Image: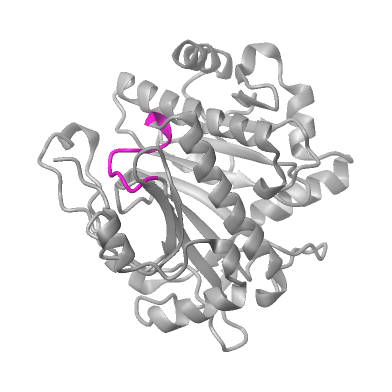
Amino acid sequence: MTQELVRERLELIVQAERIETLSVDDLVALTRREIDEFLPDGVHRVDPRSGDRILYHSSRALRPHDNVPEEVAAIPERRCVICQGATTGVIDVAELSEGFTFINKNLYPVLYPFEREGLASGLHLLQWTSSQHHKDWHNMGLADRVVVLERLAALEETLLSGAHRFGSTDREGNTGAVVIIKNYGHLVGASLIHGHQQIAFSSVMPRHFEDNARFEQECGETFADYMLRETPPELVVADYGPAVLLVPAFMRRPYAMMLLIRRTSSRYLHHLDDGELAAVADGWHDGIRAIRTVMPRTGREIAYNVITNSGPGAGLYFEFLPYTQEVGGVEHLGLFVCQELPERAAATLREIVR
């Protein structure tokens, strides 16, 4: 039988129907009231060579896992803790054509609103794409995908309104590091198979955010502006008008893609208009569908990450990173050897999404 979280179970864990009714202080209070174990260590360090930040979380290794490789996915469905409603309180719910999308707090948070100064602090939330276990970006209709993005944008805006709460600033003094990612597959960090996005609000600014800000400062344009100007037509996978899906000329691993918003003054999801949200919804749909199609063809287990680049220097763009090739020793030195040409990868991806 298809698993799903039904409304009766949802009602037992709803704390708020709309994220807009909550402040960041409300979210902090709800988190502290509900989550008191599996907390992060609160320690973070910086690699002085690269500026990479490292957060430490000893108890995260205890997370439950129900993710299985694709080749054994035909076994009977395991009981999904999300479908059973065995999770934290829900702080946002929105109806879809079937079921609903919802947001709750991560039971094993990478960041936690510690009261003691000096500790890495913040919030870690989850958006479940659909209450139906088998539904996700690759097999949902456009209207439903737009609703999911609208709720994600509303959460982003709420978190940014309290950016000062955790002192989240980069070296230029910009505030508001809201991290939005998607992991799918146990090879790339996903513990649960039920489709979801992760949202973190951090006192520690991710290095990528600073890299984008530095790019704009040094080059006089956002990274999205640069990519939109410099990418040749043969690397374009799909054009949605307000957004374009492409393969970067510097592709590090086969079939990596970027989705860029053409109006580069849009720095965050909640800045997007209706047409841009629809373009992003289509780009996520096509990018993830293409990855799920091409990886089995190449004998790879389906596993990928999606990361959101927002804020100063970025414009707004998303990276789709399939686990199509392992990392070798030379890659750890910063010299990447990619087993496919970007032009051939783009041609293959265009055939899939057209």
Residue 312 lies, with reference to residue 239, above or below; the image says below
Q: Position of residue 165 (x, y in %)?
A: 67, 76
* Residue with the most extreme bottom position: 116
Q: Image quadrant of residue 28?
A: bottom right
Residue 208 lies, with reference to residue 246, above or below; the image says below
Classify residue 77 as left or right of residue 64.
Answer: left
Q: Position of residue 54 (x, y in %)?
A: 54, 65
Q: Position of residue 121 (x, y in %)?
A: 57, 76
Per the image, is 136 magenta?
A: yes
Whether residue 206 is visible: no
Kindly identify the residue that appears in the image at 71 percent across and 21 percent down. Answer: 231
Locate the N terminus and report the quarter of the image it occupies.
top left
- 212 or 326: which is nearer to us? 212
Residue 90 lies, with reference to residue 265, above or below; the image says below
- Which colouring convention does the figure follow? one colour
Q: Image quadrant of residue 126?
A: bottom left
What residue span does the magenta drawing correspond to? 130-139
Whether residue 178 is visible: yes
Main secondary structure found in the magenta portion: loop
Per the image, is 342 magenta?
A: no
- 238 or 39: which is nearer to us? 238
Classify residue 301 as left or right of residue 272.
Answer: left
Kindly identify the residue that appears in the image at 53 percent across and 73 percent down. Answer: 27
Q: Position of residue 140 (x, y in %)?
A: 40, 32
Classify residue 219 as left or right of residue 134.
Answer: right
Kindly identify the residue that appears in the image at 41 percent across and 46 percent down. Answer: 129
* Residue with the most extreme right position: 220
Classify residue 162 as left or right of residue 132.
Answer: right
> In this figure, what is the number of numbered marks?
0
